[in-house]
């Protein structure tokens, strides 16, 4: 059995974790868009409401791990892959929010952040339990 080394969070990192739902939502939206699926398609596959999927994609819900896994299953992606991309997205997202006006940050999130993501690898790997 492999041992996993757990790294402690620094104070700055813990405040950045507040951005995780937003970053994960951006990744999920990009995965969905790359698969040419609608929010309704994902909601049907995940057995959820369309409005809930929309809220998750917009970072408005503090989503449970069970619901997060169901959405990932509906998108045929590994949850750990989505979280990995979300964690990589957090520093530029944090920068956009801290050092720009709200309008500039929103524009950056909508237009440039998805281009920073390479979701093709996680989509082709599929979802395995």
Image: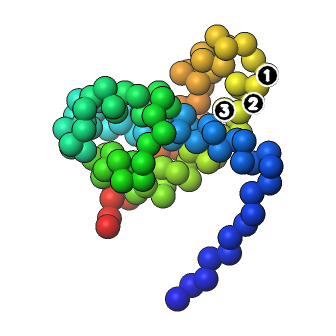
| Image point (32%, 65%), residue name | 128
| Residue 19 relative to residue 129: left or right | right
Residue plotted at (33% across, 31% down): 52
Marks 2 & 3, CB-CB < 8 Å contact: yes
**Neighbour class for label 3 at 10 Å: few (<14), some, many (≥20)?**
many
In the picture provided, is 92 more to the left or to the right than 67?
right
**Could you say whether the residue bearing mark 2 is in a helix, strand or loop?**
helix
The alpha-carbon separation of the residues under discs 2 and 3 comes to: 5 Å
Q: Look at mark 1 in the image and give the residue it sits on.
A: 99
Q: In this view, does 63 lie above or below 127?
A: above
Kindly identify which residue carries mark 3.
93
**Between discs 3 and 1, the one toward the N terminus:** 3
Q: In front: 65, or 105?
A: 65
Residue 110 x/y as whole percent: 54, 21
Can the viewer see residue 40 in this picture? yes
Res 34 visible: no
Instruction: Describe the element under mark 1 as helix, strand or loop.
Output: helix
Neighbour tally class for label 2: few under 14, some 14-19, many 20 plus, Cα within 10 Å: few
Count of numbered marks: 3
Instruction: Identify the mark at residue 95; answer none if there is no mark.
Output: 2
Find residue 36 and name its label. none
- Rounded to the nearest angstrom, the CA distance separating label 3 from label 1 is 10 Å
Residue 15 rendering spot, x and y as whole percentages: 72, 42
Q: Nearer the viewer, residue 109 or 18?
A: 18
Instruction: Measure the alpha-carbon separation of dots 2 and 1.
Output: 6 Å
Residue pictured at 75% horizontal, 48% vertical: 13
Label 3 element class: helix
Q: Where 119 sits versus 111, above or below? A: below
Colour scheme used in the picture? Answer: rainbow
- Asked if disc 2 and disc 1 are in contact, CB closer than 8 Å, the reply is yes
> Picture quarter containing residue 96?
top right
Please state the horizontal and vertical placement of residue 63, each as a whole percent of the image: 44, 43
């Amino acid at each position: 059995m492999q041992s996993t080394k757990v790294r402690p969070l620094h104070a700055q990192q813990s405040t950045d974790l507040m951005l995780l739902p937003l970053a994960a939502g951006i990744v999920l939206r990009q995965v969905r868009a790359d698969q040419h699926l609608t929010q309704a398609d994902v909601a049907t596959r995940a057995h959820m409401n369309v409005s809930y999927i929309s809220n998750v994609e917009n970072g408005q819900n503090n989503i449970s791990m069970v619901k997060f896994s169901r959405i990932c299953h509906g998108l045929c992606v590994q949850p750990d892959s989505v979280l990995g991309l979300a964690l990589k997205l957090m520093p530029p997202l944090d920068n956009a929010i801290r050092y720009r006006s709200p309008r500039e940050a929103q524009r950056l999130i909508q237009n440039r952040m998805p281009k920073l993501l390479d979701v093709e690898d996680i989509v082709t790997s599929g979802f395995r339990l």
